[in-house]
Image (tube, rainbow, N blue to C red):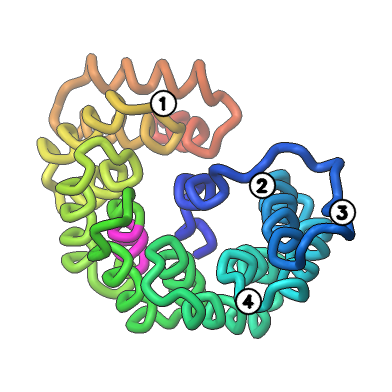
Amino acid sequence: MRQILTAFALSALLSGCVTTTQVDPTPKKEPEEAAQINVQLGAEYLRQGKLELAQQKLEKAVEQDPQLASAQTYLALVYDQLGEDAKAEAHYERALKLEPGVAATLNLYGAYLCRHDRVREADKYFEQAAKDRRYKTPEVALTNAGVCALRADQDAAEQYFRQALAANPKFQDALWHMSRISFEKSNYLQARAFLQRYAEVGQMSAAALWLGVRVERSLGDADAANRYAARLQQEFPESDEARLLAESKG
């Protein structure tokens, strides 16, 4: 369930990092200042997917300033992506010990726990993140909590998605999940409404277009279904959804 960590969440965490990756901290700087620079460099390498370089910079930052929570968080992300679970968890916990209650870190650690099937623990961290009034994107943590709950309790997941939309009615990830849940519950009018809201705030994916086809077919609106189908064939001709569409036509 690595998709639990949405691109939005990661990009929000990485925002503000420098884009220059050619300059190393100079030996003359104080350790704390040098650590901050290495965190910025490491975060930028992480954003670019250069995990080895990110690891080097962030480990150096931790060495220079072991009390710098942001270095611990970014290093946890690197180890998480490298599949080094014990190290990732240790750095997440260290970051939260240094700076308890940081919502972005709580959300990331919750995502990590969920991917490792520790759902109850994850839920606690997601809820803590969402309740932090300083957190600018509580909808991210609430949507992650919903995705985490989906496997075991669809009703609980739906409540999380609704809370996410109460926080941000235009959050596309939550709209997507609500449209899917509504369709699975045979509530086709509600599925249509959520899918229309989804389309208003961002690009339609192949999965969303395919869902649109099925929703409109279920509602008996052949014209709307055909419009979704035409877009799916035109925009995503090689997708699995386009194949399913072709198969559905017999």
The percent coordinates of residue 143 (x first, y second) are: 31, 56
Q: Taking 217 as reference, is 231 above or below it?
A: above
Residue 62 among magenta residues: no
Q: Please give the range of residues in magenta.
A: 141-148
**Residue type (three-letter) at the residue carrying disc 1:** Gln
Q: Mark 3 highlights which residue?
A: 26
Foreground residue, 162 or 187? 162
Which picture quadrant has residue 218?
top left
Closer to the observer: label 1 or label 2? Answer: 2
Q: Mark 4 highlights which residue?
A: 88
Left or right for 154, reference 31 = left
Q: How far apart in space, not on screen, are marks 1 and 2 (Cα)?
A: 23 Å
In primary-sequence order, the first of circles 1 and 2 is: 2
**Residue type (three-letter) at the residue carrying disc 4:** Ala
Q: Residue at x 86, y 58 (%)?
A: 28
Q: How far apart in space, not on screen, are marks 2 and 3 (Cα)?
A: 23 Å
Q: Are marks 1 and 2 in contact (CB under 8 Å)?
A: no
The C terminus is located in which quarter? top left
Left or right for 101, reference 88 = left
**Few, some or many residues within 10 Å of mark 1 (<14, 14–19, 20+):** few
The percent coordinates of residue 219 (x first, y second) are: 13, 31
Q: Mark 2 highlights which residue?
A: 47
- Label 3: state its secondary structure: loop
Q: Is residue 184 visible?
A: no
In primary-sequence order, the first of circles 1 and 3 is: 3
